[in-house]
Image (cartoon, coloured by chain):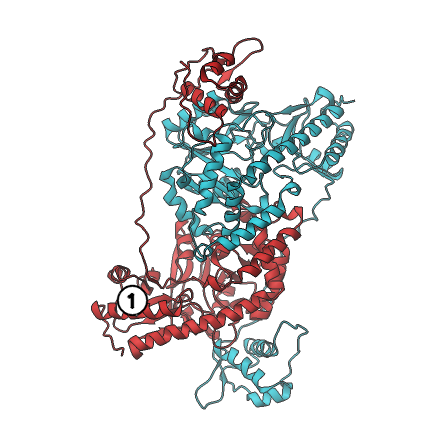
Chain colours: A cyan, B red
């Protein structure tokens, strides 16, 4: 009667296999309630294992209540433990097609991580691991590692001239988490969030996932057209004033002042996303909206572009009235950031390794940008117009007369090219940006950039997207 | 006219200080729209700085739109950039009282991090940093590091006999994030979440913060009283079957089967929180509900207790129908976990350093538990009853006849003791657990435990909480 199909899994002890086999019979009703279990001696004999092994399995059954035992009486099967093992009819998640094989992937938001000083970073991680106190390995604070908040304040002063109190710096798991938390924090019933169109899909998705309304702010060469904002009751306005994503405009001082005046008069917060302010190739970093009015602007920064995305470290500078609620939300969302990277980043900033790395990367991205623009010039001459300020890791290219839609996406992917049309990021009805493509170059080397542009040219010559090639 | 109060901040370049000073005057309206800027030569002379420095400041003003410049014409102040600098009336966040000075803090959920193998962990972090490929430092996947998912599946097999597909393992920023995401994922309009009373406040807070209804499940010595669950339309049921938090019962097989039957018949998911299943002192780990029906149970695990809380690593085993929605939510919440700790934990599991560490900690916590129970015996003899299975890092102590409320909390804190009454974790109306205290001992040494219990005894003798001391 007692046979067990031993599994060929070294990981599973004999006792556990016996336990699992007995449990399966009990659950299936093959061993009925009140029935007496075989003696451990008997079972050990028939299975050819030691009696201790069987005792261990019996202890497991008893501890979990599959059997009951009274002093002196034999062990019996417990009541009501039978379970009808009908097949559960598990639906399977839709299988996604294999990731396309993109030979030239001009995706945006990807820094060149091969140039990051990994050896130094490793060293700083190791040192941080040695220096942190036991208290810091426990639950510390949803605000973040205090020394890091201080170093970020100093970094913002020397890189952007911002005067920030470390007490107002809150560490986040990247900018994405900041947007997620802010959507919940700033929502006022019935009042829309105002977003730029086009803009990054993260903020839009977070807001619409929660069922909150959105109002769009059109974007021109200079950034968000603030004077088109007519709604006065808004939950918050989200802007990228230093380098509009994706079109690249720098929001002029007049529009900045107008936006601040609106925020003050109508009592709303502005979310300022400074996603790549470090990488400006001509002149110093743009000073942020935040420094015009720290009480109405929530500044969101990230280290995903300057260091690497899988670090998951960003921060938000939070006006005091929002801080208590933020702490509560963060505590019950994921408690806090891991401490080790925070401590290593503290050292990276304190020793100015950050400043050195940024200088190096700015040079490097500047060269990639030149290479990219030369390739554009070579293949499309002056018929194509790059948009925006000379900064960041991407460019929006305007092909006058063209119209880029799903057909372009399919045909370019088939050719091995990963390029997004700008109008994919325009959820508003106006499609004035349908003649523009968005190309990230930060993570690509010169060869890939040149090849990719030549493939794009052939595609533009072949297809008829309404644009006439005029390159050499 | 042109005077600048140089700041004594070495971090701020002269050019930026000039820029900030000019910008302030423009914003305040002291330099009016259309007004001509002084020539760079003139300003440089009056400030005693080089002309290049002034040019740099002018470039910043121009780039940000505070001034306008046409070829050949002098630079002028832009229009509409004046901002009325009225005081913004910033409310300050309420200042919290200084953290109480607790000499004997019997907080729960705190492992002893001083015994963690930091040197080995540092080494594994360093090796992981060297081995990860550039692609892994970028955005990889909201699911988690694949090799880690595989190691977790193997770990669950050898430690708990669970058969898990790595494809179903999703990495989280601790168990807290799992609960947060599951609340959003499983909510059905109007249907309550069913929670144990008492239970950990994390799940309760997450659910009520979203305005979702809650139904309570009373708890006795054996865990949740499943037969009191009468509601059939529920969003999900949250339980701690291996070691009820905080009362310590092991949910018996009969109740397990009843709960699974309910879930199948009424089509809801069970959230199984296995927060400290590793630390069972008598016999092997309890096998989870998950292994009875993987299609109706969502198993949540954490490394906060086995490694350390500030690691922020946990996982959830997710039925396939929930996986796509989970990916979407996680992607827009914080994208993914940092990669480095995931890679290091992979090595920690693969090399069995985990198994060794758990064995060591089980011994260590077992000794602490004995020490704790001896101190209880010494001071309270048999008049006090410890609840629950011999496992985990805390004990619930029942003082028959006593009633612990806010007065106890205040008086014990004043005496330097950090101890929570169990009824603080009972949001339901029934107060049958008001005679119990919750004491975490995992992070304390023998001296602290013994002293703390002696202070508790004096407090019980002094105060009148309805309990009569009978210790020696």
Quadrant of residue A182 within the rendered picture: top left
Q: Residue at position x 73%, y 44% from top?
A: A101
Is residue A456 visible from the viewing direction of this image? yes
Q: Residue at position x 64%, y 42% from top?
A: A113
**Helix, strand or loop for disc 1:** loop
Judge by depth and name the residue closer to the eye, A326 or B357: B357
Is residue A239 visible from the viewing direction of this image? no
- Compared across the picture, whether B42 is left or right of B130 comes to left
Task: Name the quadrant of the C terminus of chain B.
Answer: bottom left
- Residue furthest to the front: B48
Judge by depth and name the residue closer to the eye, A445 or A130: A130
Task: Name the quadrant of the N terminus of chain B.
Answer: top left
Residue A146 in percent (x, y) is at 43, 46
Residue B381 in percent (x, y) is at 30, 78
Q: How many labels sit on residues?
A: 1
Packing grade of label 1 (10 A; few <14, some 14-19, many >=20) is many
Per the image, the residue denoted by label 1 is: B434
- Compared across the picture, whether B267 is left or right of A442 comes to left
Q: Is residue A231 above or below residue A97?
A: above
Residue B43 in percent (x, y) is at 47, 14
């Amino acid at each position: 009667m007692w046979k067990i199909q031993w599994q060929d899994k070294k990981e599973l002890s004999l006792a556990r296999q016996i336990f699992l086999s007995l449990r399966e019979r009990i659950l299936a009703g093959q061993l009925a309630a009140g029935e007496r279990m075989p003696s451990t001696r008997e079972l050990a004999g028939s299975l050819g294992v030691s009696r201790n092994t069987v005792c261990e399995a019996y202890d497991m059954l008893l501890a979990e209540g599959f059997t009951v035992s009274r002093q002196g009486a034999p062990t019996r099967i417990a009541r009501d433990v039978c379970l009808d093992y009908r097949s559960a009819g598990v639906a399977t998640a839709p299988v996604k097609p294999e990731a396309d094989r993109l030979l030239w992937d001009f995706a945006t938001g990807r820094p060149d991580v091969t140039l990051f000083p990994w050896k130094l970073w490793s060293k700083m991680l190791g040192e941080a691991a040695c220096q942190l106190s036991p208290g810091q390995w426990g639950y510390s604070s949803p605000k973040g590692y205090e020394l890091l908040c201080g170093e970020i304040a100093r970094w913002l002063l020397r890189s952007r001239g911002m005067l920030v109190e470390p007490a107002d710096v809150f560490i986040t798991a990247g900018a994405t988490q900041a947007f997620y938390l802010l959507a919940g924090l700033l929502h006022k019933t019935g009042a829309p969030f105002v977003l730029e169109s086009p803009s990054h899909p993260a903020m839009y998705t977070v807001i619409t996932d929660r069922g909150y309304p959105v109002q769009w702010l059109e974007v021109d060469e200079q950034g968000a057209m603030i004077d088109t904002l007519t709604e006065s009751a808004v939950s918050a306005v989200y802007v990228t004033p230093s380098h509009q994503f994706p079109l690249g405009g720098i929001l002029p001082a007049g529009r900045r002042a107008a936006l601040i005046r609106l925020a003050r008069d109508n009592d709303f917060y502005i979310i300022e996303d400074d996603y790549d302010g470090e990488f400006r190739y001509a002149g110093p970093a743009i000073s942020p909206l935040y420094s015009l009015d720290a009480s109405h602007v929530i500044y969101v920064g990230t280290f995903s572009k300057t260091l690497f995305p899988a670090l998951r470290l960003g921060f938000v500078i939070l006006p005091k009235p929002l801080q208590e609620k933020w702490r509560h939300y963060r505590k019950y969302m994921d408690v806090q950031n891991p401490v080790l990277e925070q401590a290593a980043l503290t050292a990276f900033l304190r020793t100015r390794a950050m400043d050195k790395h940024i200088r190096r990367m700015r040079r490097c991205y500047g060269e990639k940008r030149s290479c990219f623009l030369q390739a554009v010039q070579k293949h499309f001459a002056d018929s194509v117009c790059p948009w925006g300020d000379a900064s960041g890791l991407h460019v929006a290219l305007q092909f006058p007369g063209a119209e880029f839609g799903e057909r372009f996406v399919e045909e370019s992917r088939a050719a091995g090219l990963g390029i997004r049309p700008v109008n994919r990021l325009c959820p508003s009805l106006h499609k004035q940006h349908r003649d523009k493509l968005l190309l990230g170059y930060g993570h690509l080397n010169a060869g890939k950039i040149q090849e990719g542009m030549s493939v794009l040219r052939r595609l533009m010559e072949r297809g008829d997207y309404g644009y006439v090639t005029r390159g050499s």
